[in-house]
Image (spheres, rainbow, N blue to C red):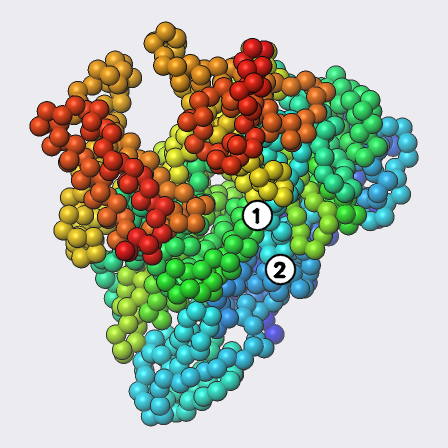
Amino acid sequence: MLKYKKIKEIAGSLVVVEGVSNIKYEELVEVELENGEKRKGRVLEASQGKALVQMFEETRGMDPSSSKVSFLGKSMTFGASEDILGRIFDGSANPLDGHEYPIPEKNLDINGNPINPYCREFPDNFVQTGVSAIDGLNTLVRGQKLPIFSAAGLPHSLLATQIARQAKIEGNFSIVFGAMGITFEESRFFVEEFKKTGALSRSTLFLNIASDPVIERITLPRLALTAAEYLAFEKDYHVLVILTDMTNYCEALREVSASRKEVPGRRGYPGYLYTDLASIYERAGLIQGKKGSVTQIPILTMPEDDKTHPIPDLTGYITEGQIMLSRGLYQQGFYPPIDVLPSLSRLRDKGIGEGKTREDHPGLANQLFASYARGQEIRELTVILGESSLSDTDRAYLRFAEKFEERFLTQGVYENREIEDTLNIGWEILSLLPQSELKRVKEKDIKKYLSTDKESKTVKEE
Amino acid sequence: MEQKKGEIIKVSGPLVVAKNMEGASIYEVVKISKMGLLGEIIEISDGVASIQVYEETSGIGPGEPVERTGSQLSVDLGPGLMSAIYDGIQRPLKSLFKESGNFITRGINVSALDEEKKWNFVPKVKEKDTVVAGDVIGEVEEMSIYHKIMVPFDIKEGEVVSVKKGEFSINDVVAKIKTKEGKERNLTMVQKWPIRQSRPVKKKMVPSKLLSTGQRVIDSFFPITKGGSGCVPGPFGSGKTVVLHQISKWSDADIIIFIGCGERGNEMTDVLKEFPELKDPRTGKPLLERTVLIANTSNMPVAAREASVYTGITIAEYFRDMGYDVALMADSTSRWAEALREISARLEEMPGEEGYPAYLGSRTASFYERAGYVECLGSKKREGSLTAIGSVSPPGGDLSEPVTQNTLRTVKVFWSLEDRLAYARHFPAINWLNSYSLYLENLKEFFKEKGGEDFAKNREEAMRILNEESRLEEIVRLVGFESLSSRDKLVMETARIIREDFLMQNAFDDVDTYNSFKKQSDMLSMIIEYYKKGLDLLSSGQSIDDVLSLPEKEKIAKAKFVPEKEYEK
């Protein structure tokens, strides 16, 4: 293999190499420093006799005159095998847990290939997360991509581990966890949580902490998804992929784009942010004739709690719904602080109901949603007019909204609710409303599930 | 003659630059490297060509060959198009699956139409007949339509030398024509057409027929004509795709072209799964039999996304030329514009607004201009139409962004989707106050004929009531509902009825999902009658509570769930 000693320029994570020949776009590059240390990168732009290389690691200490560059003739791959379960890697797929790298069964290009839309299977199977606000109202479906829109200071990490711990899909189930640009404490928290609850044995973790190279944040989700696709479509696992925090990923993308002096789109993010995000999120789904599935829960923090910021905005255009966390609810002490009104699972109606969850689920979900929305409206009115001016029905709605937050929404970090429990709590709080108000649930479901007076009294007295 | 090959000098994402390309023309299709990746020349100077590549370029490098094909990016038009699902450059996804499995790999060459299948060709001309461009020489039955085989447009006039009858595959010669210039031409059932060029017509006409979509808020309030153009902008979660799906399902077009341009893979799966099961309300045949799908999902190559809308509209024009009413949906044109932006940035062009290229406006306009109600080429009179509807995904729901604004400058119908309505579960979330249709004048006669004398008046009255409601709402917010006058209370109540019982329509309810125009106009007149009766009662001294408890209200509320058949009682 040829080694070049012709680094022309180093700027940030970008390196320009001249006098080279026969290079390929996206080819992997190795730079050997004077002291023998090797660092990796990839070709971003291949021109005649010149290559623009993006380093995956830091460029600090690289001396243009003495470093040697070699082109490896292949693009970045991930060595996949079933033994990756129970292991922890960094953003370049180096083991972080002190063990040897598992012997790969297959080397896969981390960029993957798009799933042929003709071969997709439509997702319509329920995934139980044990969290009522998700299972009951914004149901996750196998093969869906359902992001959590959070903000700085909200407990999304706690919720993510809770879902990872509790999620239940029949069959082989595994978790691929990718963390980009998180703090050391957070990464310790994740690893400890996974170890403590025994979830680690069925999981693969990819961690990139804030002090790790920025570029690895760009490759990390692709490594994670390559691992997930391998497990799902070659080894028949149902894989849940949790990616946190996509905002750090996008920041890294912006950093690289800016250092390449590209024409920026909105707020300095590159114009291809949508396409780039899609190349990650679209790697979820089911394939006809394959037993496994890839379900994604990306987590992002909205800068300034702003939903119209390019990151949440473009994410929302690609994913199939969103779970919104609310600062207001969190400050009032509710956990998980999921604001159900702006949350949405686009695939919910395909994954619930008879034979999937329970026959009353669709109607109940609509009723809870509508009643809570009405309760919120009345709350706002009460602020202006005072509670004394409300009718009895309005007051019932107010109490319903309170109970909804206290009973239905709120649950412990280690409280794993079966879907039946979630639905029963839903009916329990509906009993606070006059029956004439329950227009979205079927008559026969009311007879079967609505608590009798005696029981509902206990709710009221609680 | 061995053609000179070009040589790659630079690769940057979907853009490849090659030298030694003297003699190549702009928009010529080229094959890149030994893998034969498809690309299209988009800029050329001094023998150096910039090429946008329709497939992933990783692993490609300088020094590799670029082979010219001499032709422009074209689509194959002929029997076999119906119910096909293609990618952005007309490669059938079904064949790609057979070639490469569940994931799309590179450099696969498959023909767009099934070359093996035999079609029963029925001639419509005789020997010695004189034919001109666009004349139908025969037809084959394909799914729910008769696929007409037309004289290609480059034969201006000629005489039929021979014509066959029977079972043929698409590449078999079915007729021979001696052109006026004296050349003999063999005709097969396929023709090619470059996608960036619109197919010619005899003349364009003013559209004056309603494209009935079965959606109340669209047909009655903001109608679109056959041959019209419209757009559906809205933030995410406001139901753009559902609106487009509804129109594809229930509109009375003969053929639907659905372009999934940079959107979700699962949405295409949904269409593929649902359309074969749903029946066309007019013909009773599965909806997929009148549909052509173009799927270039968000994770498929960007350059092919740019081409996908042109591929779609060229196929649409082809069916229009046969004299059919074609409706084209592009979901979403914002992703197409973003693809333009991405390529433009790689070409290092001077950016316009928000990084979009300065020619975004002209490209958008020329796309929508390909819609229209036309008289087709050919000696016999044939009318066809192409309706173009595009969704727009404005960032953050902000309609002032360039793609929405450029689209609004061209299209005549604007259905504004709002997330506020979607959160309140008011679907379709089309805002009735700022949406518009500029076809009302064109449709005046049509409305009179199909909806009766009163329809236009009722519609206006309903719009007036809704406008008044929005004014009154502000007052209510300040002083409460009770302080309104009786007349204003009636306005508020009628507006609520219009909103909840007329504008809201459940796409997932078996009956409510589709309403004939006749039923719509009757429902509207019921509501306006109630309002008028209420006004009369009020002026004769009755209390508002009596008016609000009139039994008519219940009948109105139930009307939308009465099946079309029963309703005709």
**Residue at 23 percent of width and 62 percent of height:** B205
Residue B267 visible in this rendered orientation of the protein? yes
Q: Residues within 10 Å of mark 2 (few under 14, many from 20)?
A: many
Mark 2 is on which residue type? Leu
Q: Is residue B234 left or right of residue B20?
A: left
Q: Which mark is residue B37?
A: 2
Of A119 and A87, which appears nearest the observer?
A119
Q: Give the mark, 1 or 2, whose residue is nearer the N terminus.
A: 2
> Relative to residue A435, is residue B235 depicted above or below?
below
Q: Is residue B191 left or right of residue A292?
A: left
> Relative to residue B337, is residue A65 depicted above or below?
above
- At mark 2, the secondary structure is strand
Task: Look at the image and tell me in which quarter the C terminus of chain A lies.
Answer: top right
The answer as to whether the residues below labels 1 and 2 share one chain is yes
Q: Position of residue A70 (x, y in %)?
A: 79, 43
- At mark 1, the secondary structure is helix
Chain label for disc 2 = B
Q: What residue would you read off at disc 1? A: B266
Residue that lies at the very extreme toward the left in this rendered image: B540
Q: Position of residue B110 (x, y in %)?
A: 60, 67
Q: Quarter of the image holding residue A321?
A: top right
